[in-house]
Amino acid sequence: MWKQISVLGLWVATVAGSSGPSWSQEKAADEQARKFAFDSSDALAGWTVTGDVAVDATKGRQGKGGALKVGPGGKALLRLRERDESGKVDVWVYDDGTTPEDVKAHRVGPRWGLVQDDGKVLAVGVLYANYLGGNEGYTATACDGKSWHDQLFWLGVRRTPAGWHKWTFDFDAEAGLAVFHNDKEVTAVDSRKAGLKGFSAIAFWGDGVVGSDSGKGKEQTVWLDDLSITLGGPVMVPAEVEADPYDKKAIAAETSTSRPAIVYTKKDAPATPKLDELPLQQSISQHGITWTFREPARIGRFINGDWYVVGPVTITAIEPKPLYGDEIPRRELDHLDKERRPEHRVRNGLMVNPPAEMKVAYDSGVRNWFDPSLIQRPPVTIKPGDSLVSTISMPKNLVLAAQLRNKIERGFDDSSPIRTAAVLTCVGGPQPPDAFRPAFCDRRQRIYLARDLKRELLPTAAATKSMPNVRRYVRFTERPWVGTCFFGFEEPVENMPQYGLEYGRVVGISALLLCTNLTPQQKEPLLVNYVQVGIDIGGMVRSGHPGWTGWGGHGSGRKLPIVFAGLMLGDEELANVNRSFPKASFGEDEQTAYGECWTGAKVVFAGHSGIDAASGAGRSRNSGWGPYEHLQPSEWKEGQNTSEAYRRCCTSVGWVAQALALRLMHAEKAWGHDPFFDYVDRWMHENDAAFVKTIKEVTGKDHDKDWARQGQAWDTFVNEMWAKHRPTLEASTDGWKQKHNDDDYRTAIEKSQ
């Protein structure tokens, strides 16, 4: 039974013998910290307690005074106010390190934290489960106060050494909740995921004794001391906002996707303007970014709409303003920001001449690839040959729909913290109106011209009824794809796809649209954008980028735009990128190979991580993720099962459009990796019904789901185009059944890393 201590409004302050103000006093008093010790039985005035809860006069922190003891099954709750609002709670907790015999059994130990008026809880403490290390460290839980394991945050904070630990719950009115251990923020607790709108009470729960774990010596008691509470006002954390930059309304508002298409040819090549014919401007804007020059400068536009400036020129200001360190509001810091030194934090960042490497400095919320040594600040001077990439960061609480699939939110999972990017190129003089922007990683600044496009290479295959809106794909490709890294950690959400599967789908469908019977004027905006994407990605590889490895679905989609742009521009180096850069990695190539498959096919999926292009070795990554289809499913371990799952969910279904477009263009030789084409034919034609059954029988993995079965692409348009046009092509659809030289695959297995 619950019992209410009858002495109301009496608080024992840290100064012995003094009493603090009651909770009923005016709000002005609430804004000051109230400090409580537990030196006498009067210290529990106003608390609601049950079970083993008492003042222990012998256990005070630093050997002075008493402490509040909360034993197994005990609970102490202190109601602070009628409404859920902001505030800060500091408390010291004594953890003696006691653990049950079975630390992997489902169990709750002592906990302490905030309580909302509706009973929702955010608490930290000791929880046990087979997936937790409750004997080693602390866990936070956000729940209804009953289902303690529903939503957990493993804190990475060790319980050792045994003794007093300081815990702070700082619920800022604007920034939301932050949790600290010994004055160091525990960034694993995400305020919005915790779901509290404020708090009106605090509580301490004793060891939740359950079942056979209730034996003597296995239960834990904790002690609390030096409690300090500061109550704040109403919580004003911004509400979550969802937006889709690619929906019909957003695309209709994009004037650039509907501008008249001019099909330049050598016969009607445009004249290059003279310098004094270019506008003289103090600033220019694109994609929400404005660059302001120290002095008015001559500016022009490339054929895809991107700006150039005749330089050298100094950019004195950029909007949105780049922010650094303490300029970034606390409410905008995500968990990665908080783990970095303040001087390494950045928003709306910029880079002059980004390296063709997996390191960037646009935003300190970028995982893995953020390099603070590359941070730059305005003013910056750019000279002919330079490219400036400016970005707009994702604010917290904004959820953006990505291209074709997925939702992206700053600080969640693998999401990019970058919203959009624009490229400003500095040139030495005026450019022809049909000039493509040089690749932003290309310091040689190669200039290609639209008049040289070999449009005759584009087929005019009849489009099917499900053909998507071409303007949508124009929008998908109109902003620069500046992703030099991997996993989508730094890819601008409003510019480019966020996962390899969608990367492959977007580039495949874009190429397929350009192979249909659309008119040249209908194709031109997409053609220009798509070739520009290929120029940029090709420029990365030319400048030394290692490529995009097979890694589940992540490495797909980069090769096709390079090959396509090379073919259309007559650039043999790009068109034959495998031959030109044999050590560059591309997921589609690394994950397909000729080999004896357990199904009887003669071409295989080479695994989650495929075969390393540089060394020819199977890439296991210590997880068994390399070549596996030569094995019977009965021999598969967890890594091989993972590979099979990725074969079905995240790779093959996104490759079909790419393969069909290349075949329609008769570009198989330029692609330079025949197993890819035969593998896609296998995927679309091999009946896998019996194989799915076998896999389930011997591994327990069930792939008999509509989305996981062979014989289909992800998109209806691709399925229809395949059915209509693949049978009409000269290339056999049975190449996957024919014996091929499989020496490379055998070598990859022998050299498996």
Image (cartoon, helix red, strand yellow):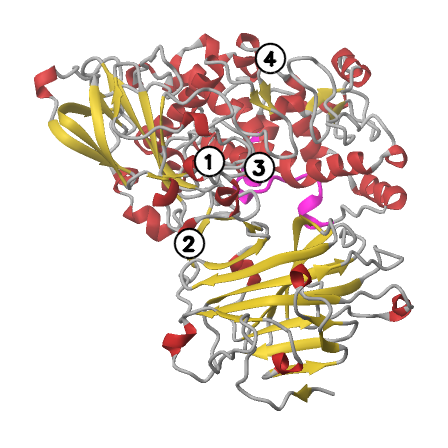
> Which residue is labeled 1 in the image?
491
In magenta, the rendered stretch is 705-725
Question: Which amino acid does the dot numbered 1 rest on?
Answer: Glu
Query: How far across and how far down the image is residue 118, in percent?
Result: 56, 78
Q: Quadrant of residue 630?
A: top right
533 with respect to 124 (left or right): left
Q: Mark 2 falls on what kind of element?
A: helix
Residue occupying the point 73% across, 59% down: 95
Contact between marks 3 and 4 (CB within 8 A): the answer is: no
Q: Is residue 716 magenta?
A: yes
Could you say where residue 177 lies in the image, as x and y percent from the top left? 50, 60
Furthest-bottom residue in this view: 6
Disc 4 from disc 1: Cα separation: 24 Å
Residues packed near mark 2 inside 10 Å, few (<14), some (14 to 19) or many (20 plus)? some
**Magenta: main secondary structure:** helix
Q: Is residue 400 magenta?
A: no
Residue type highlighted by circle 3: Leu
Quarter placement of the C terminus: top right
When asked about the image quadrant of residue 315, the answer is: top left
Residue 456 placement (x, y as % from top left): 39, 18
Tell me the amino acid under the disc marked 2: Arg
Nearest the eye: 74 or 695: 74
Badges 2 and 4: C-beta atoms under 8 Å apart?
no
Q: CA distance from mark 1 to mark 3?
A: 14 Å
Q: Earlier in the sequence, mark 4 or mark 1?
A: 1
Report the mark closest to the observer, 2 or 4: 2
Instruction: Identify which amino acid the numbered label 4 is placed on.
Output: Lys
